[in-house]
Amino acid sequence: MSTTSNVRDLLEGHITLELESIDRLYLNGYVPQLQHGAGLVGFLCQQRGQPIASPALLGHITGKFVAEVKAFAKEQSIPLFHFERTESKDRRAHQLRRERPVRDAVVFIGIAQEKAHAFSAHRLPGKRPVFEFTRNKSVLPNYYYFYLDDADWGESFIKVCSYAPWGLKLYLNGHEWLKRQLTKEGIGFESLDNGFLTCQNPERLQALANALGPQQIQSFLVKWLDRLPMPLSTQDRTAGYDYRLSIWQLEFSLTQIVDRPLRGRQFFEELIRDNLDLGRPDRIQLIFPRNGEFSYARAA
C-alpha cells in the first residue's frame, strides 16, 4: 500500500541551508504635524517665522530643495536624470549600479513625475490675507529618487516628494543587510540574486536575521536624512518636524536549499497541490542551478 509524501517528509534530511528572515521592506516616511492644514500653517508661521502662511512659501521651499539637489549632484559628480515615463526604474538602477560601483554613497539621482495628494490654498474673506490649506488635491509633482549603496544595507533607495507635506518612501532589503553583516564579520557565503545559497556559519546567519528590527531601520533613515538634501532642514527636524516611518509593504522569506534536484521537483509538485485551494498564488518560480541545489519563490 503506497502512502503519499507530504512536504515535510520530502524535505527532511535534504535541506543544506534554512533561513527565516525579512526580505523586502517598503516604508512610508511622514511628518505627523504636516498631515493637515492647521499643522502646515503652524509650521510656516511658528517654525519658519513667516507672518502669513502663503502658498508662495511652499513654492519657495520646493524650489530651494530642487536647487540643493542639483548642487549636491554637481558637487559630488552624481548622475542626475529624468526617468522616461514607461521605463523600468529597477532596470535602470541595475545598469547604473554596474557602471558606478560606489560604496556607502549615492549611486545616482532619478527624477519622476508621480501622483501625490498635495495641499491647495484658499484665501479667506477679509482685508488681511489669510489662507486655509486643505489636502484634497491630486497632482503630479516630481519625486527625487536617491539610489544608494549603504554600508549596512547595500542596495537601497529613498524617494522624496518635492511638494508639501514632503513625504518619503524607503526601499530596503533584509537579505542585502545580512550579506553586509556577514562580510563585516568575515563569514563566507554564496549568494543568490536575492538570498543565500550557502553560508559557513548558518547559526550566526539566523541570529543576525533575528536581530534585524526597527533600530537598524531608523539608523538608516537618520544617517541619510543628515547626508542628503531635504525639503525640511536639520533645524526643522530638531524642532520636532521629524519623519516617522510606517510600513507600506513588508515581505518575509523562508529560504530552504535542497541538496538534490529530484527532491526539489517532488517538493515543488507537492507545493502546487497544497496551494490549489489555499492562497492560490499567481506566480511560482522554480530554479535549478548547475550544482543541483533547489530554491523556489512563491507570490500570492
Image (cartoon, rainbow, N blue to C red):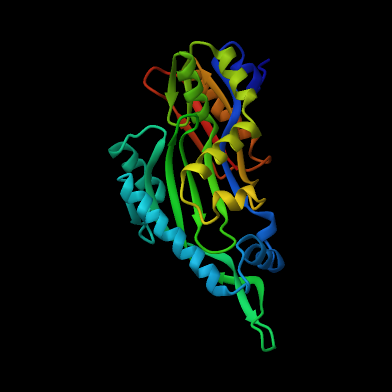
Q: Is 112 located above or below residue 190 in the figure? A: below
Q: Quadrant of the N terminus?
A: top right
Between 75 and 85, the one lying in front of the other is 75
Q: Quadrant of the C terminus?
A: top right
| Residue 292 position by quadrant | top left
Q: Is 58 located above or below residue 15 in the figure? A: below
Disc count in the image?
0
Between 171 and 35, the one lying in front of the other is 35
Residue 89 image position (x, y, % from top left): 40, 50
Most distant residue in the left direction: 99
Residue 106 image position (x, y, % from top left): 39, 41
Q: Residue at x 66, y 84 (%)?
A: 128
Observer able to see residue 285:
yes
| Residue 5 position by quadrant | top right
Q: Residue at x 47, y 42 (%)?
A: 227
Most distant residue in the right direction: 38
Q: Residue at x 54, y 16 (%)?
A: 17
Residue 215 image position (x, y, % from top left): 64, 32
Q: Does residue 167 appear to the left or right of 60 in the view shown?
A: right
Observer able to see residue 294:
no
Residue 161 image position (x, y, % from top left): 51, 58
Q: Does residue 293 appear to the left or right of 4 in the view shown?
A: left
Between 291 and 277, the one lying in front of the other is 291
Q: Is 148 located above or below residue 145 in the figure? A: above
| Residue 120 position by quadrant | bottom right
Q: Residue at x 47, y 18 (%)?
A: 184
